[in-house]
Amino acid sequence: MATTKKTTAKTAPAKTAPVKEEPVKKTVAKAEPAKTVAAAAKKAEPAKTENVKVETVKKAEPVKKAPAKKAAPKKVAPKKPVPVETKVNFFVEYAGAQVPVEEVIKNVKATYGKDAKEISIYLKPEESKAYFVADGNAEEMDVFFC
């Protein structure tokens, strides 16, 4: 690695005159030819000026931020219309009297006495009776039309 000379601002680089090359003589001493060759190589090279790195000072530019990316709108599948639960009022009318079906169902559950997984109800207004099957057990109850 070659070393470079640094000059101060007071001294200017000296102009060198062309150097005549001398023929290298071979001698028996080993150390001297190396010095002579190195010295001859230095003399043969033209004078170099100081290696000065010129760096330009850039003004600090404001950091440009990338524009904030807006999240792409998510594709939303069209919503299925929610089935509207319709309230149904169902009455059984016989001989001028009405009985709501919800009341019949409530009375059948009370007559059975315990929770059933499945109940089937058969209403016969002419007999004023409701026949039902709850979890495979067939029973009957009176229905009063008032």
Image (spheres, rainbow, N blue to C red):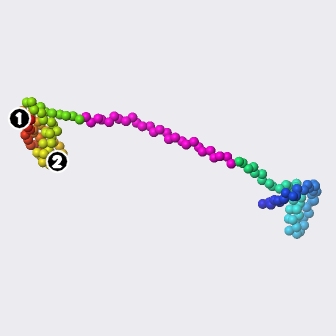
Q: Give the main secondary structure of the magenta stretch.
A: loop
Q: Which residue is mark 2?
A: 115
Q: Toward the viewer: 100 or 105?
A: 100
Q: Toward the viewer: 139 or 100?
A: 100
State the quadrant of the N terminus: bottom right
Q: Toward the viewer: 111 or 119?
A: 111
Q: Is residue 105 visible?
A: yes
Residue that appears at 14% across and 48% down: 114
Residue that appears at 8% across and 41% down: 141
C-alpha gap between disc 1 and disc 2:
27 Å
Q: Which residues are magenta?
A: 60-86
Image quadrant where residue 35 sits: bottom right
Q: Is residue 136 visible?
A: no
Type of amino acid at the residue the image marks with label 2: Asp
Residue at the outermost front position: 146
Report how many numbered discs are placed on residues in the image.
2
Image quadrant where residue 92 sits: top left
Residue 127, percent from left and from top: 5, 35
Query: Horizontal placement of 36 versus 81: left or right?
Result: right
Residue 95, percent from left and from top: 7, 30
Magenta region includes residue 43: no
Type of amino acid at the residue the image marks with label 1: Glu
Image quadrant where residue 121 sits: top left
Magenta region includes residue 80: yes
Give the SS element for disc 1: helix
Residue that appears at 14% across and 39% down: 103
Residue at the outermost bottom position: 29
Q: Residues within 10 Å of mark 1 (few under 14, many from 20)?
A: few
Query: Horizontal placement of 126 versus 1: left or right?
Result: left
State the quadrant of the C terminus: top left
Q: Which residue is mark 1?
A: 127
